[in-house]
Amino acid sequence: MIHREINTVEKEVRAVVIKEYMAEAGLDECVCLTCGNASRYLRAEGLNVEELIEPEDWYTESMIYGKWGRYGLFNATSGMLSAELMMRVAERMKEIYKEDMKWIGEMEVVCGSGETFVVMKLAFPEVVMSAVYNVDAATRWHKEAPLNGLVEALAYKVLIKQ
C-alpha cells in the first residue's frame, strides 16, 4: 500500500520544524533546492526562501553552503536536514500517525530525496517499509541524493519505477 498523503504531511511538519529551528538559531532566510513542494510549505510558514526549482544537477551540501551559506542562509533542501531536525520531524509524524500505524505491518513510502522515508522509518522502526521512487516528477530518483545509502540500509526494498 502506498501512502501519498504522508509526503504532504511530512512537508508541512518539516516546514514548522525548520521555522522553529531558524527562530532558535536567529536565522531569517533559507535556501531550498526543490521541485517546488518543499519551498511552498516553507513559504506558507512565513519563511523567506531563496529557491532553485528543478536544478539540472543534484547539488552537494558543500556546494549549497559554498554558494548560499556565506549569506547566512539555512539549507532547507529536502534530504539535507541534520539528524536532529529529522528526529524532530519524526517525533511529530509519530504523534500524527501513531493510531494509523498500529495496524500497518508493511508499507511503501513514496520519496524523492529519501527524507520522508527516513523520517517515517525513524518514527516507526517496527514497520517494514519499502522506498518507492519515480512515481511523478517530485519523486524522481537521483543517484547523487545524499540519503540514498541510508534509504538502502533501512528499506526492505527500494523500488525505482521505470
Image: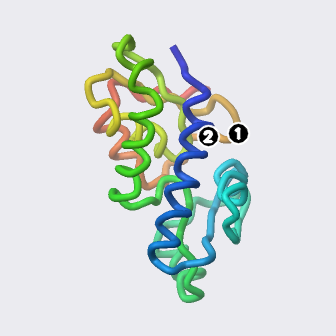
Q: Residues within 10 Å of mark 2 (few under 14, many from 20)?
A: some
At a point 35% along the width and 50% down the height, the residue shown is 87
At a point 53% along the width and 82% down the height, the residue shown is 69
Q: Position of residue 127 (x, y in %)?
A: 32, 22
Residue holding disc 1: 137
In whole angstroms, how far apart are the C-alphas of marks 2 and 1? 5 Å
In front: 15, or 119? 15
In front: 100, or 138? 100
Q: What count of labels does the image hold? A: 2
In front: 147, or 1? 1
Q: Secondary structure at mark 1?
A: helix
Res 51 → quadrant = bottom right
CB of mark 2 within 8 Å of CB of mark 1? Answer: yes
Q: Is residue 36 above or below residue 96?
A: below
Q: Which mark is residue 4?
A: none
Give the left or right position of residue 39, taking residue 67 as reference: right
**Disc 2 residue type (three-letter):** Arg
Q: Is residue 15 above or below residue 126?
A: below
In front: 118, or 90? 90
Res 16 → quadrant = bottom right
**Disc 1 residue type (three-letter):** Ala
At a point 49% along the width and 28% down the height, the residue shown is 109
Q: Position of residue 53 (x, y in %)?
A: 73, 59
Residue holding disc 2: 140
At a point 44% along the width and 37% down the height, the residue shown is 93
Q: Position of residue 101 (x, y in %)?
A: 40, 20
Q: Secondary structure at mark 2?
A: loop
Q: Is residue 60 above or below residue 126?
A: below
